[in-house]
């Protein structure tokens, strides 16, 4: 197969240019990584190539396919997605229809893209699941997305992308929500498909170590402009542009400051968690202690029980939790509704995806002050003033208070989420994968912010993560979970040495 070339790709909003011009070459059997911070134009590039730009944006430029020029936006371009260009979205849970079996979704794509009849589509769906090494294809094809693991859902997305026998896979952050093992497996799968099928892969990613291991070439975007392009090894060894050097430096996270912990604040005693309808507990016999001014990282693969333990701690699970969760000696699991409300004022929470956890209908100052309104802690003017103080504390400019969440970058949204978590002056901060969706620069900034807040406020920080490097940069101690059980507990520098993989 001949290379597919992207020539003069630009995206405009009226007279304002948002992206480009970009010239990229996608070689059969090779991977080109597109790297840059949030807002640099990576996902905009994929949307332009797929003809999926939002209303008000226009793309120009052309694709060279088998020596033929295909203008973007032309009828010929509209025939390429699914057949020549195939998309692997970032979030499998959002991309798959929750009410349809995955086999039906795949068979429909096969019938539409390749004109197969029902029986042929069923046979080809089975063959694709076998090629992608999904276990027990006949049973898996009959399942719904929520019945699959994260890694299995990712492979189903790849099967859907392969349905039209494309030449190029456009992979948008395919590892951002996966633990290190599943991330390596996902990119290993792309390597296998490149080798076996001669596919070209355009990989959008903010995970620089993964890019270094799997991409042959690298293109760096900043503010919609291509600032550097070349062989991956050469760019990593001798970055020519200052922005590339900043990206590489941001991925090198420092170790946490060694500070003596304070008195114990949180104690988990013999925690066991069983979900309704299941006989086997997902978490068994977990006992931990967290001190004021200390960060404890809770690490493990997907399905290890990390997030279940976090939900139990926050009393987001009504049933199936045994043992005791003591906050300053008081059992959260035994607290009545009135007392639980008071105890929750002492706990702040930062979730994984700020785009999902921030109400899009509220302005930033309303989001940050919402806990104050819920707990009746101040009047309208007091809440407004407190929101301004909190935004300043997390390093955001006061003028951002009037913006909506969609007007902020990913790093800014996560800082807003942290400001909201601090609104009631909590003593315990629970962070559930709080940096996994961020690029290297924003990730480093948020980790630095959390470390500073921990020191200045004496916060106890429970940091749930599959990112070993982030755990090393923030946590003095580490608890490693596997299959719902505590496998190791000790100093982070001993349990997660510097060579450990990142997710």
Image (tube, rainbow, N blue to C red):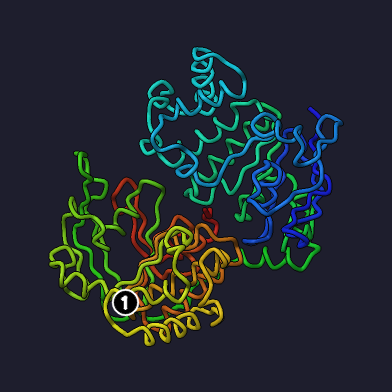
Residue 10, percent from left and from top = 78, 52
- Viewer-proximal residue, 222 or 282? 222
Write the residue at 53% across / 36% down: 157
Write the residue at 67% across / 29% down: 83
* 258 lies above or below 6: below
Residue 67, percent from left and from top = 87, 31
* 112 lies above or below 293: above
- Viewer-proximal residue, 194 or 71? 71
* 395 lies above or below 162: below
Write the residue at 37% across / 87% down: 382
Q: Which residue lies under the disc numbered 1? A: 373
Residue 216, percent from left and from top = 73, 44
Relative to residue 51, is residue 107 drawn left or right? left
* 240 lies above or below 138: below
How many discs appear?
A: 1
Write the residue at 46% across / 70% down: 474
Q: Residues within 10 Å of mark 1 (few under 14, many from 20)?
A: some
- Viewer-proximal residue, 387 or 256? 387
């Amino acid at each position: 197969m001949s290379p597919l070339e992207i020539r003069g790709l630009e995206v405009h909003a009226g007279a304002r240019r948002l992206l480009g011009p970009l010239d990229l070459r996608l070689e059969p059997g090779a991977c080109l990584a597109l790297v840059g911070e949030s807002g640099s134009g990576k996902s905009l590039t994929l949307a332009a190539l797929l003809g999926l730009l939002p209303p008000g944006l226009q793309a120009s430029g052309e694709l060279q396919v088998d020596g033929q020029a295909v203008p973007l936006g032309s009828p010929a371009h509209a025939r390429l997605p699914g057949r020549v260009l195939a998309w692997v979205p970032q979030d499998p849970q959002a991309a798959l229809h929750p009410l349809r079996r995955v086999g039906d979704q795949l068979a429909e794509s096969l019938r539409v893209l390749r004109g197969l009849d029902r029986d042929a589509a069923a046979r080809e769906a089975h063959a694709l699941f076998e090629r992608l090494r999904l276990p027990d294809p006949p049973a898996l094809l009959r399942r719904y997305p929520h019945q699959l693991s994260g890694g299995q859902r990712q492979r189903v997305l790849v099967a859907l992308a392969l349905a039209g026998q494309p030449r190029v896979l456009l992979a948008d952050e395919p590892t951002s929500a996966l633990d290190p093992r599943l991330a390596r497996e996902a990119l290993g799968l792309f390597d296998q498909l490149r080798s076996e099928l001669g596919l070209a892969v355009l990989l959008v990613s903010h995970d620089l170590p993964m890019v270094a291991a799997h991409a042959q070439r690298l293109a760096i975007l900043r503010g919609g402009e291509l600032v550097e392009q070349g062989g991956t090894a050469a760019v990593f060894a001798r970055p020519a542009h200052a922005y590339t050097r900043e990206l590489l430096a941001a991925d090198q996270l420092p170790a946490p400051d060694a500070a003596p912990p304070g008195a114990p604040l949180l104690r988990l005693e013999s925690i066991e968690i069983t979900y309704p309808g299941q006989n086997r507990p997902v978490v068994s016999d977990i006992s931990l202690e967290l001190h004021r001014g200390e960060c404890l990282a809770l690490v493990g693969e997907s399905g290890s029980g990390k997030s279940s333990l976090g939900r139990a701690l926050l009393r987001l699970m009504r049933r199936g939790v045994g043992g005791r969760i003591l906050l300053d000696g008081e059992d959260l699991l035994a607290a009545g509704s009135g007392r639980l409300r008071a105890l929750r004022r002492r706990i702040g929470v930062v979730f994984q995806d700020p785009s999902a956890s921030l109400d899009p209908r509220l302005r930033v100052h309303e989001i940050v002050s919402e806990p104050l309104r819920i707990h009746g802690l101040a009047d309208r003017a007091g809440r407004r003033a407190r929101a301004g103080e909190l935004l300043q504390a997390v390093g955001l400019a006061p003028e951002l208070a009037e913006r909506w969440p969609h007007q902020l970058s990913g790093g800014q949204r996560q800082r807003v989420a942290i400001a909201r978590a601090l609104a009631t002056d909590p003593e315990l901060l629970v962070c559930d994968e709080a940096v996994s969706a961020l690029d290297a620069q924003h990730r480093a900034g948020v980790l630095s912010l959390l470390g500073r807040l921990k020191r200045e406020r004496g916060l106890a920080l429970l940091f749930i993560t599959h990112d070993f490097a982030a755990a090393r940069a923030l946590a003095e101690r580490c608890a490693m979970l596997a299959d719902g059980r505590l496998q190791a507990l000790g100093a982070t520098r001993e349990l997660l040495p510097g060579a450990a993989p990142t997710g």
